Image (spheres, rainbow, N blue to C red):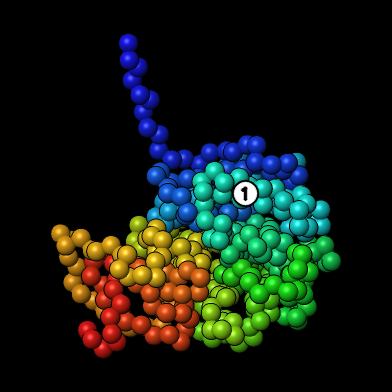
Amino acid sequence: MLKAAPPARAASIEQVTGFGSNPGALKMYRYVPDGLPAGRPLVVALHGCSLSGSGLAADFGTRTGWKELADRHKFTLVLPETSTANNSLNCFNWFKAADTTRDQGEALSVKQMVDKATADQSADPSRVYVTGLSAGGGMTSVLMAAYPEVFAGGGIAAGLPYGCAPETNEWTCMSPGVAKSPAQWGAKVRAASPGGSARTAWPTLSVWHGSSDTTVAPANLQELVDQWTDVHGADQTADVSDTVSGAAHKVYENPAGRPVVESFTMSGMGHGQPIDPGTAAGQCGRTGDTYLPDANICAAHHMAAFWGLTGGGSTPSPDPSNSPSPDPSTPAPAECFTSSTYTHVQQSRAHQSGGYAYADGSDQAMGLWNTYVQATLKKTGDDYYEVVATGSC
């Protein structure tokens, strides 16, 4: 008698064991979208502190919007989780030398999770990113500094610069914060990994903070900007200053004109990471967590856009002849947009890879990804744009 095939299971967040020596005694959770092909990116998302002790990783991945973004843009999501055995408040130990030194403690445990997930999913090792809220943001700083060859970019919400603790008491780092020069902060990062002083490639950073945060002082946003602009050899004068969905937004470019650090200051927001529940482009997140306020802007989406992950799940190709054609059965009225390649990426009309911009849908090359190169895109279908000559439409 033939047995019926078991019903197909939809993708879900699942725990993974056996990912390495795990010296930090962390748990690993992973979300892999159905049908995810090889060669896709990988994102690590680190929760903040919690008194509940249950569902930390899964709740964070779902409520921040990272799980839905993994489905939307096709990448693997890794969700580390700590416990009260490590920290009484379920915080990652971003302030302990034993957990923040390369190849030790919690830092090494997360690195081993990345190695496991990259191997299992055949992920693109050049497109691995890390993000976190609060203590998770502090640990994001650690991972970017300790493993700059692993992470192409980072996203920090209500977090702290690398190396503030254990040099200084962690509570002082949090509030009122510690002021150092960009060179002093940058030196801490360069000293964190072998050959750091000679490195030319570092993770990019998207940093977020509420102006009314009384848990982690808002001054930490500027210290993070100072730290990572210095690491990239950029100055501390913003090349772009604008407003995005009510948030004060700044972009800092390296000497080659590539955006390497951006910051968002949420006016009146307290401690947390903003979300914007909904199904429209750019929206993500779910309500239900005090530290994930609905602020009409989803930080996770903008982080992913800054990293170049919001290109509709397609792998950039510099050769337009390899690009798919729009479906003629669903025509869309022609609409043109002229702006910098940086703005096109921020507005989800294009994506970036390796410092170059590519039109969403057609994957046509647009030139360097920065605020100086201008391009005109013609929308010819849903999420499908073609490069046209400026002024031709």
- Image location of residue 128, percent across then percent down: 56, 58
Q: Nearer the viewer, residue 174 or 260?
A: 260
- Residue at x 32% of width, y 15% of height: 2
Residue at the extreme top of the image, as rendered: 1
Q: Check the image and report above or below for 225 versus 143.
A: below
Residue at the extreme left of the image, as rendered: 329
Give the quarter of the image for residue 255: bottom right
Q: Check the image and report above or below for 133 versus 386.
A: above
Q: Residues within 10 Å of mark 1 (few under 14, many from 20)?
A: some
- Image location of residue 251, percent across then percent down: 54, 80
Instruction: Say which element carries label 1.
Output: helix
- Image location of residue 114, percent across then percent down: 61, 50
The quarter of the picture where the C terminus appears is bottom left
- Image location of residue 41, percent across then percent down: 50, 56
Is residue 243 visible from the viewing direction of this image? no
- Residue at x 65% of width, y 57% of height: 136
- Tally of numbered discs: 1
The residue indicated by pointer 1 is 115
Q: Nearer the viewer, residue 348 or 264?
A: 348
- Residue at x 23% of width, y 76% of height: 335
Q: Nearer the viewer, residue 363 or 185?
A: 363
Is residue 366 visible from the viewing direction of this image? yes
Q: Residue type at mark 1: give it.
A: Asp
The quarter of the picture where the N terminus appears is top left
- Residue at x 31% of width, y 65% of height: 323
Q: Nearer the viewer, residue 228 or 356?
A: 356
Tell whether 321 sits left or right of 258: left
